[in-house]
Image (cartoon, coloured by chain):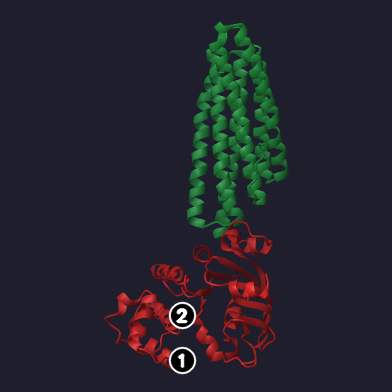
Chain colours: A green, B red
Amino acid sequence: MQRSNFERGIERIDDLVLSMARSVGEALGRASHSLMTQDLELAKSVKKGDTIIDSIQASIEELVVELIATQQPVATDLRHLMSVMKLASDFERAGDYAVHLAKATKLFFAEPAWRQFESLKVMAEKGQAMIEGTARAYKARDSALARRIAAMDDEIDHCHKALLSDTLSLMQEHPHLAEKAAKIITISGFLERLGDHMTNACEAIVFIVEGTRIELND
Amino acid sequence: MNDRQTHDYAALVVRSLNIRYADGHEAVKDMSCVFPRQGVTAIIGPSGCGKSTALRAFNRMNELIPGTETTGEVIFGGRNIYGADMDPVRIRRHIGMVFQKPNPFPKSVYENIAWAARIHGFKGGMDALVESSLRKAALWEEVKDKLKKSALSLSGGQQQRLCIARTLALEPEIILMDEPTSALDPISTSRIEDLIADLKKDFTILIVTHNMQQAGRISDMTAFMLMGELVEFAPTKRLFVHPEDERTERYITGRFG
């Protein structure tokens, strides 16, 4: 009886984690699209959607605390619950970065598009792929997939570095654009961090499945 | 580990222990392990897995059950306790046991300790022994004014601590505990657990428990038994976070069967 309660709890948590990942992935897609199309309404919807993401995280934490208190989980069960807390917090951060990207829409509104926007779009797409892949690896409890997804972080890092050097030279040529250029660098940095958070989430999945702590972002 | 190191580290060394009951049931199959000195080792496993039978083998209690056949070795202090020249009564002085249900003698609190000590030839100051044993068992403050009262007038938790005090009076090296809190309420259980944590500095404690949370709370090492077999024996922290054997994982997470 108690076990089935526990398993029902885990199923509920799984649903929440997957729906959180879906929301964060969509938010990132909308944020990137709003910047490219100068769609202020779409950008606003990202900000609004973030409260939903935060509330899903709160529900996950509540369920985890409840299960620990009432079921005294050990072994895989305990590793699962501890890791889910980290996973949810990584997705929550990713959601915040999507909001930062969406905010750029207003900042650059009614201006000609910067060439860096294309790079930001590519980074956001890679971020989305990492979010979706992380969710798939979690759902399937697939540590090999988690490792492959974490490896995608290198591509985002690479994009960030390229954007950084491109934007720095632009700042030197056109000092009057420095303020906005700095903003672009900040946003690129957020997307780079998003990749790190998905890497951490993948490490948490490996810990659930294999019981070993690993560093995937070296 | 060479023999000398094993001797320093080990309270008990079990080698190929097999125990068969009169009806042919093999309760313990080829158990081999080293129980470290001091600290608490918990033995867990489902009902009928052989954990209590194994525990009783460590001070030769099984031979009180007619037809029980024990083979293999249990080395204590460098000698096999099943050796031909070994006296079970002497062994039980060094390796004491506390049972599931508190079983004080129907005598006074004082006599419960004094009587056991006298039987084993204690000739020192009895008052001092009674007091120090009751203090070690964290019972003195509660019973110092009713030493002449019947032990049966104490609460269940106090009776169990009296039984522990009685065991301590003989100054054993190892204390075997067979589900010592399963008949007690949570508060008495917690007192006994605190007591165990205190006693492990001076004694080696082997405890059989059905309560996995208890094993997790109080033990340093945990042994998991299944159908007479010692499946896994590891530091408690490791066994409860990342057990190596699939069967241990299934049992401790409640997915067994």
**In the image, which disc is placed on residue B48?**
none
Name the image quarter holding the C terminus of chain B. Answer: bottom right
Residue drawn at x 46%, y 80% as measured from the top left: B101
Q: Position of residue B152 (x, y in %)?
A: 36, 84
Residue drawn at x 62%, y 33% as measured from the top left: A196
Q: CA distance from mark 1 to mark 2?
A: 23 Å
* Left or right placement of residue B155 versus residue A17 in this view: left
Quadrant of the rendered structure where residue B170 is?
Answer: bottom left
- The chain that hosts pointer 1 is B
Q: Is there one chain holding both mark 1 and mark 2?
A: yes
| Whether residue A16 is visible | no
Front residue of this view, candidates B104 and B196: B196
Residue farthest along the left direction in this orientation: B145
Which secondary structure, mark 2?
A: loop
Would you name the residue on which mark 1 appears? Answer: B120
Residue drawn at x 68%, y 78% as measured from the top left: B15
Q: Nearer the viewer, mark 1 or mark 2?
A: 1
Quadrant of the rendered structure where residue A192 is?
Answer: top right
Q: Position of residue A184 (x, y in %)?
A: 58, 17
Q: Residues within 10 Å of mark 2 (few under 14, many from 20)?
A: some
* Left or right placement of residue A68 versus residue B45 in this view: left
Q: Residues within 10 Å of mark 1 (few under 14, many from 20)?
A: few
Would you name the residue on which mark 2 appears? Answer: B101
Q: Is residue A130 above or below residue B209?
A: above
- The chain that hosts pointer 2 is B
Name the amino acid type tagged 2: Lys
Which secondary structure, mark 1?
A: loop
Name the image quarter holding the N terminus of chain B. Answer: bottom right
Front residue of this view, candidates B122 and B158: B122
